Image (tube, helix red, strand yellow):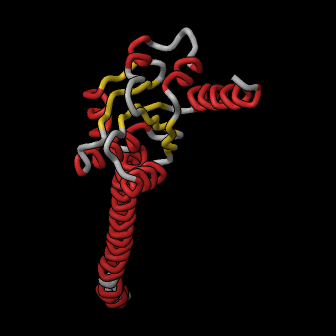
């Protein structure tokens, strides 16, 4: 092997190792039978899920894996293999692979690696059925919005009730004052009744 080839292989091995270290998950597929156009479509679908789809020689991938890699992952590295390196959302990447494989039977999902744990094909498909990160965030945002709307509605109702209560108290406070004023009016009549006392005084003069 020439020095140039050796350097090239070392660079590929280092690239694979770094991608495994940095990825949130790695999903393994077999692409036998996919043409150039289908591969381009698959890469585009995975790119939308923030996932890089790469093809390496299986021997170089095996050399890049460290001793802590589950043995079952190495067993998947047979045949025409492509690796999907997930940058953020494993569920979104798994969903993209599942949807593509449903329309293109040539794509085979083998399994993968998530948080250091080995996934088989069935587990990757189960992962695809889970809500994506964006869907979860949207659901959480909607759940938070509903209580806030309820709180705002309750506050408006309380303010309305307080305003009605204050108005009722104000009306009740004005009414007795008017009644008291009406009750005090007969005092003038009492003064008129006392006038005959002068006549009695006139009768006593003899």
Residue 65 image point, x, y percent? 56, 18
Residue 61 visible to an observer of this rendering? yes
Residue 111 image point, x, y percent? 35, 27
Q: List the single residue furthest toward the right.
A: 3
Residue 63 figure quarter: top right
Residue 104 image point, x, y percent? 26, 49
The residue drawn where x is 64% and y is 31% is 12
The residue drawn where x is 40% and y is 42% is 93
The residue drawn where x is 36% and y is 52% is 35
Query: Left or right of 10: which side holds 149?
Result: left
Residue 55 image point, x, y percent? 50, 38
Query: Left or right of 15: which side holds 75?
Result: left
Depth check: give the residue in front, 65 or 183: 65
Depth check: give the residue in front, 122 or 38: 38
180 versus 40 height, above or below: below
Residue 147 visible to an observer of this rendering? no
Depth check: give the residue in front, 2 or 92: 2
Depth check: give the residue in front, 44 or 34: 34
Quarter in which the C terminus is drawn = bottom left
The residue drawn where x is 76% and y is 26% is 3
Quarter in which the N terminus is drawn = top right
175 versus 196 height, above or below: above
- Picture mark count: 0
Residue 101 figure quarter: top left
Query: Left or right of 53: which side holds 150?
Result: left
């Amino acid at each position: 092997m020439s020095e140039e080839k050796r350097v090239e292989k070392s660079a590929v091995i280092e690239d694979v190792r770094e991608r495994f270290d940095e990825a949130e998950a790695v999903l393994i597929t077999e692409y036998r039978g996919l043409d150039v156009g289908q591969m381009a479509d698959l890469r585009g679908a995975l790119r939308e899920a923030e996932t890089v789809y790469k093809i390496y020689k299986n021997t170089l991938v095996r050399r890049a894996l460290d001793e802590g890699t589950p043995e079952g992952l190495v067993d998947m590295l047979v045949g025409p293999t492509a690796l999907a390196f997930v940058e953020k959302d494993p569920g979104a990447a798994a969903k993209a692979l599942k949807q593509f494989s449903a329309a293109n039977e040539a794509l085979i999902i083998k399994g993968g690696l998530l948080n250091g744990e080995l996934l088989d094909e069935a587990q990757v498909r189960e992962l695809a059925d889970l809500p994506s990160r964006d869907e979860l965030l949207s659901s959480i945002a909607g759940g938070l919005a509903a209580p806030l709307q309820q709180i705002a509605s309750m506050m408006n109702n309380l303010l309305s009730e307080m305003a009605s209560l204050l108005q009722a108290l104000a009306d009740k406070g004005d009414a007795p004052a008017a009644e008291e004023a009406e009750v005090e009016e007969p005092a003038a009549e009492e003064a008129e009744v006392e006038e005959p006392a002068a006549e009695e005084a006139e009768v006593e003069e003899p």
